[in-house]
Image (tube, grey):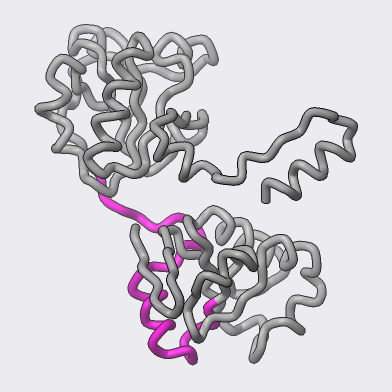
Amino acid sequence: MSPKSAGQAVKAGYKNVKIFMAGDVAWMKAGYPTYANYGWVCRGNNVIVDLRSAEKAKEARLPRSISMPFAKFSETYSQIPAKAPVVLYSDDDTETLAALKILREDGYKKVALVEGNFLGWKRVGGSLINGPVETKPLWTRSLEEGEVSMADFEAALKDPKKAIILDVRTRDERATGGYPKSQHVPLDELCKEMDNFICKIKDLDKKKKIYIHCTTGARAGMAYKELSKRGYNASFLLAEVECEGKNCVIKE
């Protein structure tokens, strides 16, 4: 996706355009922060953590946030479900970056910050609540719109009659390995030649289920939206998929 976006920027007249080929996965592994957008903070299926003192949280805090003061965060963070997406905020970057590091080092993969912390949220007009604080995260995994469950995806891997498995990774990624019974159309080719899509996939009609995967779920989600617009019965896998030869491992 990055080269395609860079090409559009060059066509628009930008001269100094570079591509970070390693992507957001490498960015996070290197320890750099990621930030949650406004909609995800407001409506996401996540755990929002207020690292400020409980007194400050009682006066004003983000809706749905739980109070986990940074002073005792290393003792309390284990209450957060390991698979939960987490959003952190405090009064300054020192605490949020330290808490981010603690979570990532302990295996939490979906951790982001509120840009500008508490004051940044107020500046953009984010809603606030007050009163007694919550201290225990209540979170359960729920499927997003268009997302296929792990059980259904794995069932289709065992029985191809249940659904077509569509791999939208790049050709280079596919060269390192993939599901033997999956069909491969890179996302850029899929979107570019959508009208010819039915010719590329065997045994396809609009009633046939299509389960899409990539390496993290981001590109699969984009492919799902494009196919759904055109009436295809598509769903996407929101999980990490790592393949070596015919062996693929799925991690939620």
Residue 228 falls left or right of residue 251: right
Q: In this view, does 180 lie above or below 244?
A: below
| Residue 173 place in picture, x, y as percent | 56, 65
Q: Quadrant of residue 70?
A: top left
| Residue 141 on the magenta segment | yes
| Residue 48 on the magenta segment | no
Tell me what residue is drawn at x 68 percent, y 46 percent: 2
- The total of numbered circles placed on residues is 0
Viewer-closest of 46 and 159: 159
Q: Quadrant of residue 158?
A: bottom left
Viewer-closest of 75 and 2: 2
Tell me what residue is drawn at x 32 percent, y 15 percent: 90
| Residue 197 place in picture, x, y as percent | 74, 76
| Image quadrant in which the C terminus is located | bottom left
| Residue 240 place in picture, x, y as percent | 41, 58
Q: What stretch is highlighted in magenta?
A: 139-165
| Residue 97 place in picture, x, y as percent | 34, 21
Tell me what residue is drawn at x 66 percent, y 81 percent: 206
Tell me what residue is drawn at x 29 percent, y 45 percent: 84
Q: Residue furthest left?
A: 75
Q: In this view, does 205 lie above or below 100?
A: below
